[in-house]
Image (cartoon, helix red, strand yellow):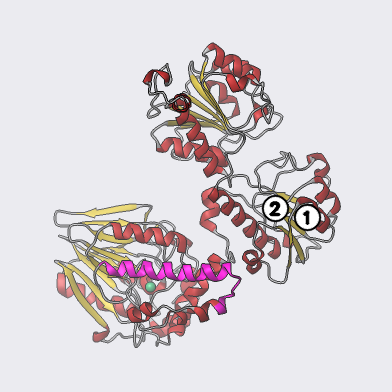
Amino acid sequence: MSPPIRILIAAMGVVLAPAHARAEELRPTELGEGIFLIEAATAPRFVGANVGVVEFEEHVLVIDPGFAPVAQFAKEWIASRFGKPVRFVVDTHLHADHAFANQLFTRDGAVVVAHESAATLTSGASAAAFAAQDGERAAANRGDLAYVAPQVLVTDRMVIEDATRRVEILHLGPGHTAGDLVVHLPAAGIVFTGDLAVNGAFNYFGDADPESWRDALERLAALGATSVAPGHGPAGDASIVSNQRRYLEELTAAVRRGVASGAGLEAIREALDMPWYREWTGVEARERGENLARIYAFEAGLEAPARWIAELGLVAERERPRDAAGWRAPRRVVIASWLSANWLAPVAPGVELIVAESGAQAAELAADADAVVGFCSNEILARGRDLEWVAVSSAGVERYVDLEAWAGLDCRLTNAQRIHGPPIAEHVMALILALTRGLDDALAAQARSEWSAGAIREEGLLELRGKTLLVAGLGGIGTEVARLAHGIGMRVIATKRRVDGKPEFVARLGGASDLTAYAAEADVVVNCLPLTRETTGLFDAAFFAGAKRGAIFVNIGRGRSVVTADLLAALASGRLGGAGLDVTDPEPLPKEHPLWRAGNVIVTPHVSAGTDAGRDRIARLHRENLRRFVLGEPLLNVVDRAAGY
Ligand SMILES: [Zn+2]
């Protein structure tokens, strides 16, 4: 029995399953022909998870063997009912109450199927967790059983089919755990949900990813099953899934409101009132303290948002500051006023958060602070002699500080690299689509109230599907650009300084030296490179001369990576078919600059990163880094002193 299950059982006041389960505690229910749910009691005592049984022509599939007494019952019941071997055991997730007794079936030749990330579930049925459970195993299970790791790992889906039956084993995203699987029988309209959806009070959030869980439940509902077999509690209709989602959403909303108002976990618990939940489960929602605590940990930022960090590709520094000689916990941190102190406070217990309204005020306050979050300048660095960390809200830091002066200081800088990938990638697509769909001409015609197809892109509208887009600089932003371009059907090729980690949606990845060769086959070239010595003036006459005739050039990197005169010449000669520029050299672009009047050019004034969601994202990064800073854990997005970004 894994630690959270133990805690949960204690919290619910139920008695641990003894070595035998009584017959009335295990009720096989036929959900469809040859499809059964053996419902295992959770009250008055907890016997284990429900077991699913699906009959095939020559074998049987078992879902969640559970604890040994339940599995033993299931095994005997299957033998007498079907007289066929169990060939597959599906663990919907690796909590011990679902997966403990795998070995009862693998001994007779069954293969265990689980999600590929199930093994990362630290509190689940890992070998170590099982080994640690010896005492209770003797009481609740059979001492002769050992952990059996899954032999077949599912990424998104797996199908088991014979002449009589088709079963789809699906991963709908992280939810109850990182590695949830559901077992769907489309013809029968039946789905076994594991603990992704539970019917009743035995509903546990301890390893949950609440944000992704909601989406997974939406996908679960979209399967359209009319008969739902949950991990705990009786089988029923689709309302099991909608109740699970309602519980998750209402609990999250209540906690979010509480966190925003500065309420602590206890105050939120006391205020929690969910009569419908009591009606559904027989338990008050506020009594499920561990579920509330899990949601609170997410909403208050007490826990690293691991999936969010991985999705954006954020990188933590290698050394752990706490391990360095002389490390001490911070005491005073200056924060920009747009960051709510209420919202940051839970991750910085015992730390004084001082709000600064301006950069000048932040510089004054920096003198006796350990960190400044949300402002950065040479003055802040000069005055803050004890500063350990300054957090910048943009990707580039070179416009705030003299990098050479900073190189002599101990203070670490963190930036917003990769954070702005999603909005900038959308901006790139907007520029490309505006050019290929002739929106620049259309808007000009519209301003003249002129309905004239001939006024729009005299070369004709372009279709992107099947064309090639080159991402120069496949970092955080470039990867998002590649993802979107691939999504609308483009072939994506890319270059990167270190050629590693090619995403599936990129057809070919080369090094910096491949840029010219790749450009020759690209219909669209997007510069996502940071400004360094190597990339200054990189896009010059020689580059444009090698580009595919009529290609579109987009720049959201830095203006000075492009030789503007050469870009203008390439546009004028028709070598380039158009350009979308969110950054220019010079910046701001002077009124009389020829770029304003060049044909097929769309200029936006360096605005691609600023969006509604972008602000939330940067706030979340600052909060996560503050949490790490207070604990002396490695910070995310630390600026490399040598590279300057
Ligand atoms: Zn469970």
Residue at 46% x, 64% y is 210
First reached walking from the N terminus: tag 2 or tag 1: 1
Q: Is residue 589 left or right of residue 68?
A: right
Which residue is rendered at x = 32% and y = 67% of the image? 242
User: Of all residues shown, which one is farthest toward the top?
Assistant: 573
Confirm or deny contact between disc 2 and disc 1 (CB under 8 A).
yes
Tell me the residue that label 2 is attached to.
374
Name the side, left or right, on which 393 lies relative to 124. right
The image shows residue 460 at horizontal and vertical percentages of 39, 19
Magenta span has 239?
yes
Q: Would residue 195 be visible to someone looking at this image?
A: no
| Residue that badge 1 annotates | 362
Q: Quadrant of ligand 1?
A: bottom left
- Judge by depth and name the residue closer to the eye, 5 or 399: 399
Q: Position of residue 518 (x, y in %)?
A: 51, 24
Mark count: 2
* Residue 42 to residue 550: above or below: below
| Label 2 to label 1: alpha-carbon separation | 9 Å
User: Does residue 178 show up?
Assistant: yes
